[in-house]
Image (spheres, rainbow, N blue to C red):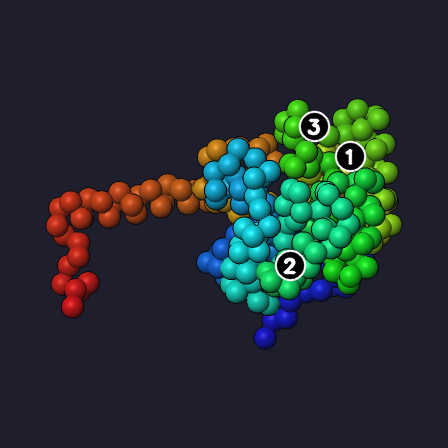
Amino acid sequence: MKKAKTILDFQRMKEGQEKISVLTAYDYPFARLMEQAGLDMILVGDSVGSVVAGYDNTLPVTMDEMVYHTRAVVRGASRTFVVADMPFLSYQVDLAEARRHAGRLIKEGGAQAVKLEGGEHVAATIRAIVDMDIPVIAHIGLTPQSIHRMGGYKVQGRQEAQARQLLADAEAVASAGAFAVVLEGIPATLAAEITAQLTIPTIGIGAGSGCDGQVLVIHDILGLCEKYSPKFVKRYADAGALISGAINDYIHEVKAGSFPGEEHSF
C-alpha cells in the first residue's frame, strides 16, 4: 500500500532532481482522484475562498473553513502528504495565536504541514511553529493575502530591489526552519536563482520551470474557474463544458419526461 511522502522524501527529491507535483484540493472527491493518480502533495489552499466560495480574494477565509476543508481532503487522500494554508489573521497577530491555529490544522484538520505567506517578517512565526514540531512551507513573491499592499495580483521581483528582497526572504524562511517554499509570480530567472541558492525545495506557481516542483489550482487546470485566467495556468481539460452538457441533458430529459425511466425507478 502506498504511504504518504514525508518532508524527508521531498528533500531527497530535490537532491535527486526529481520534480515535485502539487495541486490544490478542497474536498473529498478531488482529493481521492489526486491520490489515485499518484500526486506527491496536496495543498488545501485558502484559494478556496475565490475558487469555491466566490469571494474576490482569499482574505475572508476563516480558520473554521480551513479546518473543514482540510478534514474533507484528508478523508479522501489519507495516503498523500497534505498541507493546509493558514488563512489571513490566523498568524499575523502574535506567536501564540499562530501556534494555536497551526496546531488546529494538524490536530483537527489532519494535515501533515501548514503553509503561511511572507518572508523575513514572518521568520520568527515560522520558527515558533516549527519548534512545535509542525512542518511549515513558506510562500514568497506574489502573496495573495498582501494584494492591498501590492496593488493587486502583480508579478514581484522584476525590479532589482524587489529581487534582492526576495533572495533575502528565501534565505530567511529557510533559516527559520521551513522545509519548502512556494515561489509565486516571480521571473523565471530569479526563481531559478533562488532554487539554486536554497537547500530546501522550491515549489513554483507562475515562477518558471527552474523550481523543484510546481503547484496549480485543480479548478484552473480543469477549466472550472472562469473568474480568473492567469498567464501561468495551463488548462489540461475542459471539464466545464462537459459538466454543462450533462446538466443541459438532465434538464431536457426532466422536461421531456424521459427521466426517470423504468431502470431508475423502484
Q: Is residue 223 above or below residue 6?
A: above
Q: Quadrant of the N terminus?
A: bottom right
Q: Quadrant of the C terminus?
A: bottom left
Determine the CA span between mark 2 and mark 3.
28 Å
Q: Residue at label 2?
A: 104
Can residue 112 be seen in this snapshot?
A: yes
Count the marks: how many? 3
Q: Nearer the viewer, residue 135 or 215?
A: 135
Residue 156: where, in percent of width, then height?
Answer: 73, 30
Q: Residue at x 63, y 53 (%)?
A: 84
Q: Image check: 62 left or right of 167?
A: left
Residue 98: where, in percent of width, then height?
Answer: 72, 51
Tag 3: Cα neighbours inside 10 Å, few (<14), some, or many (≥20)?
A: few
Which mark is on residue 149? Answer: 3
Determine the CA span between mark 1 and mark 3.
24 Å
Q: Image check: 247 left or right of 197?
A: left
| Mark 1 or mark 2, earlier in chain | 2
Determine the CA span between mark 1 and mark 2.
37 Å
Tag 2: Cα neighbours inside 10 Å, few (<14), some, or many (≥20)?
A: some
Name the element at disc 2.
helix
Q: Residue at label 1?
A: 189
Q: Residue at x 69, y 50 (%)?
A: 115
Q: Residue at x 84, y 37 (%)?
A: 167
Mark 1 belongs to which amino acid?
Thr
